[in-house]
Structure formats: C-alpha cells, structure tokens
Amino acid sequence: MENTKSSGGIKGLFKSIGTQKLIAVIALVAIYLFFAIASKDFRSWSTLVSIFDMSYYIGFMAIGVTFVIITGGIDLSIGTVCICSGLIGGQLYKMGVPIALCLIITILIGIVFGLLNGLMVSIMKLPAFIATLGTMMVTRGLGSIVTGTQSITYPLRTDPDGWYSSLFRIDVKTANGVMPIPIGIILLIVAAIIMAVILNKTRPGRYILALGSNKEATRLSGVNVVKWETLAYMISGLFAGIAGIAYASTYFTLMPGTGNGFELDAIAGVVIGGTSLSGGVGSVAGTMIGVFIMSVLKTGLPFVGLQPHYQLFITGLVLIVAVYADVRNRKTSR
C-alpha cells in the first residue's frame, strides 16, 4: 500500500498524539484535584466508587466507538443501543427468561445494530452521521415499544439472580459497615488491553487503521473495505451491548426513551484521548484516559453545586475544545 504521508509528517503526527495524551493525563489529575479541593465530600471512597461506576458504561461504549472513529466514521447510536439492549434483555427476564441468557441476548442485540450500521455505511453508502442518527431514533423508540413505555428493573445484588452485578461491584463487610469494591474496573481494563492488542497487533486492526488513513488506497491494495468497515461498527455495537449490562448492573433501573447523550460522553472521551475524527489515528489507551476525564467531570460537577443542565453545557464545551485540539494537531503535523 502506498504511503500517503511523508515520514516527517508521520513523526510529527505521532509526536502530537503523545503530547495530547500527556496533556490529557495532566488534565485528569488537575480536574480531580480541583474537585477534591473544592469539596471535602468529594474526597471519599463512595465518590471514587461512583466515578468507577460511571466509567464502566461510558468506557465500554468509548472502546467500541474508537474503532469506528478511527475509520473516519461516527456512531451516534451507541447510547440508545446501550439502553435499548438493556431494556429488551430486562423485558425478557421479566417474562421468565434466565438472567444469563438475557445478558447474552443483550450483547447480541448490540452486535445486530452494529451490523446494520456497518451495512448502511459500507454497502448502502449512507453517511455515517445519518445512518447512525437513524439507528439512534429507531432504538430509542424500540425500547419504549418493547417495554410498553414502562421502566425495567434488573435483579438487585441481594437477589439470587443478581450475581451478574458482582462482576462490577462487590460489597465487603467491615467493622464500619459495608464497603463497596468496584472490581468492574478490572473488566474494563482487561477489555481495553485486549482491544488495544487487536487494534495495533492484528490484521483487522491494521486494516481498520488503514481505512481511516486512506480508504481508496486501502481498497486499491486489495483489502475488502466493506468487510473491515462493517466489522468496526459491529465492534461498536458489541461494546454498546456490554455497556447496557454495565449500566444495568450499576443502576438496576432502565428508563425507555433514554440513552441519547451517552454517546457524547463516549465520543468526547475518545477525542480527548487523541483519536482523530478525521480517522487513521487513535489508541484505546488514550480513550481510557479521556473516559476517566469525563467520569470525573460528571461525578464532580454536582459537588460544586452545578445542576444537570450546567453539566451538559460543560460537557459540550469539553467536546468542542477536544475537537479543536484534534484539528490543530492535524494541521501542525502536515
């Protein structure tokens, strides 16, 4: 495959990526310290657990959508697919289906919607923005239709079928009461490591990166671009389904018609972590840094007295700044 960039440009791009990751780490530490200084209540174990709890569903969605963004695409449906998958799985449990099978079906539903997104983008040639926006609306409505607009409650940790939630948190009895241990962070890190290896060390990962760098050159080199572009969206759907399980295991109750907005947190985390919206550049490790920045922000803002509408406003600003930094890095690397 012909290299479309000069060696100097590539070196400059790698340098800018490393710089952006370093800035992201510094920003994460600074934001955490700011909230810790501003509010003594923030400096508690329960707050740290809340940060981890939020990082699960945002993190899984972000890992998946990293692959899509690297191809130069976008997936706006991950938030509603996350909730829709969880709602359908919960409705099946309500109908008597074993919880283990419900969790599997939840993930499969995410994969199916990822496949549909991939086919619309790669074969039907729909713009990714329009295709996934349509899927966002479809899944938002489907969750309400399946559940009859009723909220779905998953089994609690104290229930016999609540074992699945122990994958993300366990309660340890201490002299002062019960102490929650957020073991789900282990699952998130393991998933991130596996997907980082797939992205950087395997043929599918290299092809997905190549699609974002130069899709036409990749096609001319004999690579099946339809196959690998579709795979990227299927990975996004897979992790949206897993995010649905993570959300249910943390909050237990899912509301129909929700989930839109989750994708902004995930995409912001991806871009903050150094993945370019232009495609061809990105890393799962950087995504994880961005995810924790978003989790700390969303958890910490209420501690300084900001209401949800202010939180959404600040999230939007963070996304704009992250995209602007990406654009600047791309220009300076040319």
Image (spheres, rainbow, N blue to C red):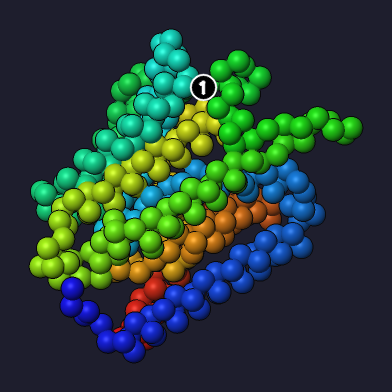
Residue 3 lies left or right of residue 269; in this view the side is: left
Q: From the top left corner, tell me how far across and down residue 159 is, in percent.
A: 62, 16
Q: From the top left corner, tell me how far across and down residue 296 is, in percent.
A: 61, 55
| Residue 332, image quadrant | bottom left
Disc 1 target residue: 153
Residue depicted at x 81% and y 30% = 173
Q: In this orientation, does residue 118 appear?
A: yes
**Foreground residue among 233 and 144:** 233
Q: In this orientation, does residue 257 appear?
A: no
Residue depicted at x 59% and y 68% = 25
Residue reaching furthest front? 202
Residue reaching furthest right? 175
**Foreground residue among 254 and 102:** 102
The image shows residue 224, relative to residue 178, as above or below, that is: below
Say few, some or many: other residues with alpha carbon within 10 Å of mark 1 (under 14 / 14 to 19 / 20 or more). Answer: some
Residue 159 lies left or right of residue 247; in this view the side is: right
Quadrant assignment for the C terminus: bottom left
Quadrant assignment for the N terminus: bottom left
The image shows residue 53, relative to residue 149, as above or below, that is: below
Q: From the top left corner, tell me how far across and down residue 39 is, in percent.
A: 76, 56
Amino acid beneath label 1: Thr
Residue depicted at x 22% and y 79% = 3
